[in-house]
Image: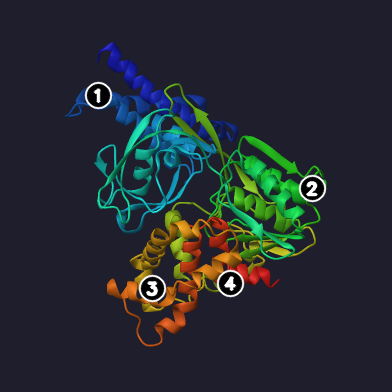
Amino acid sequence: MNNSTIKILRTICWIFIAVIILVMGTRLLSKNEIKVDETAQNWNKLLTILSNVEERYVDSINYEAVTEEIISSVLKSLDPHSLYFPPKEMKEADSALDSKFGGIGIEFNVPNDTVIVSNVVSGGPSEMVGILPGDRIIQVDGENIAGVKMPQDTMVSRMRGEIGTHVSITVKRPQVAENMDFMIKRALIPQNSIDVFYMVDDTTGYIKLSKFSRSTYAEFMSAMDILHKDGMKRLIFDLRDNLGGYLDPSLLIANEFLPLGDLIVYMEGRVRDRENIHADGRGKYKNVELSILINESSASSSEILAGAIQDNDRGTIYGRRSFGKGLVQEPIYYSDGSGIRLTIAKYHTPSGRLIQKPYKKGLDYDYDIIERYNHGEMVSADSIQIADSLEFYTKSGRVVYGGGGIIPDIFVPIDTTRATDFFVKCNRQSTMFKFAMSIADQRRSELKRVNSIEELDKYLSTLSLESNFLNFAAKEGIVPKKGEWAESKDYMMTYIKAMIGRYSALDEEAFYHYYHKIDNVMEVAMKK
């Protein structure tokens, strides 16, 4: 082999070895399971195998691809959340939590394989050039993205890019014959982590948090300040479908509700001593009554926050068992822009529960949520698999259970009462969404003049929505059987009003105002 080949092989090998040593080496040595020279022999074996590949393999070798594959395979073999990111993916992973990114300033949905703009960021690049809610994006930089079954994350990546660069967008606008072309200059777009906050009644505030980003704590405190001034005595904090993100915001938010000295979370790992994080007693909202909503898609930082509140008996948790992601990832960056997220410790709730669900060999980690459906956990609290050996106690002595995820204090099942064949067919074909969009397209100027829920209720009552929707569905070949409409009507029409309301001046507040009327978890929480 020539010198350059040897260097490449050594680079591949030592990248591999560095990761293995970082994760396994100290454990092996600390337990005296093998000697240092035996460890070296294992690494030499790897180098020998790679040399054999170089000398004898039938085809030419893509060394970069081999290196990437080796690193990815090593990390995947350790746990489900230790990951390797090539340079481009590393940048995208960081920007997703950065509260800002280079984009065009739109929110959209993708029913039937077509991007439909649902909202345009005020003052953003798209608004500046005239993009409107309801526009259908059919091409990006001359490439078709409509009707070609392009993955949604690929669509997003086509529109994002370096700040200051330009992207060409072609849209189809309802009631406009010709397609419209726009050249948009990408800019920094703030990404709010709070979807909506408002007063549900005279004393109950509501906050819906979608992720934990760098701006989350500041957003949360601003929302709380407004709600508190509006008379909030109780907060319903919705963490459903919040997959987590940065740790610090969840700790800071928990600190706002807990008295001095309460344990929030502790972390512990093989080479990392236990680290306890306590409340400092300076929280502003220690007297606000607290209810937290979670479900099977609440993960990581969401679970840390919910676990801290539950174990300290500071609030009530409603919903379904959370996801169960309790591994501490440390980002490690490399000079080529790539990086890894390496698990270095595990999160435990104050009572000692391990948040992370099992991931040992033989367990189908990726299909855990499906298994919960299959054995009935989503519709019955009695179906939650609880091990008596994993019994823990809250600050007041209440029993809580470990085994992965946070089990709510008050279980609320998935609502299956609306699932008639008519509803299922409409849902499968996005009929409700498409109907709401058609109304928004026709009534956009009127909707934008609506400034209160009362005005919106009154306006929507003039549109004969029920009969128009049934006619719209019939044109798509969907007609309810006898009794189906009576069974599904209340849910479907309320949801349609919620989606139309999103295009009014009230935006997300209108959506959640209606949606909460058919949200069974919210209904139970409000009856507390």
Mark 2 to mark 3 CA distance (whole Å): 47 Å
Query: Given contact means CB atoms under 8 Å apart, are the residues at marks 1 and 2 in contact?
Result: no
Going from N to C along the chain, the mark reached first, 4 or 3, is 4
For marks 4 and 2, give the one nearer the viewer. Answer: 2
The residue that label 1 is drawn on is 54
Compare marks 1 and 2 and give the one earlier in the sequence.
Answer: 1
User: At 61% from the left edge and 53% from the top edge, which residue is drawn?
Assistant: 303
Residue mark closest to the camera, 4 vs 3: 3
**Mark 3 lies on residue:** 469
Q: Quadrant of the C terminus?
A: bottom right
Q: Are marks 4 and 1 in contact (CB under 8 Å)?
A: no
Query: Disc 2 residue type?
Result: Lys
Residue labelled with disc 2: 284
Where disc 4 sits, the SS reads helix
In three-dimensional space, the C-alpha distance between marks 1 and 3, rounded to whole angstroms, equals: 66 Å
Instruction: Specify the amino acid type for callout 3.
Output: Phe
Q: CA distance from mark 1 to mark 2?
A: 64 Å
Indicate the position of residue 157 as horizontal and vertical percent values: 37, 39
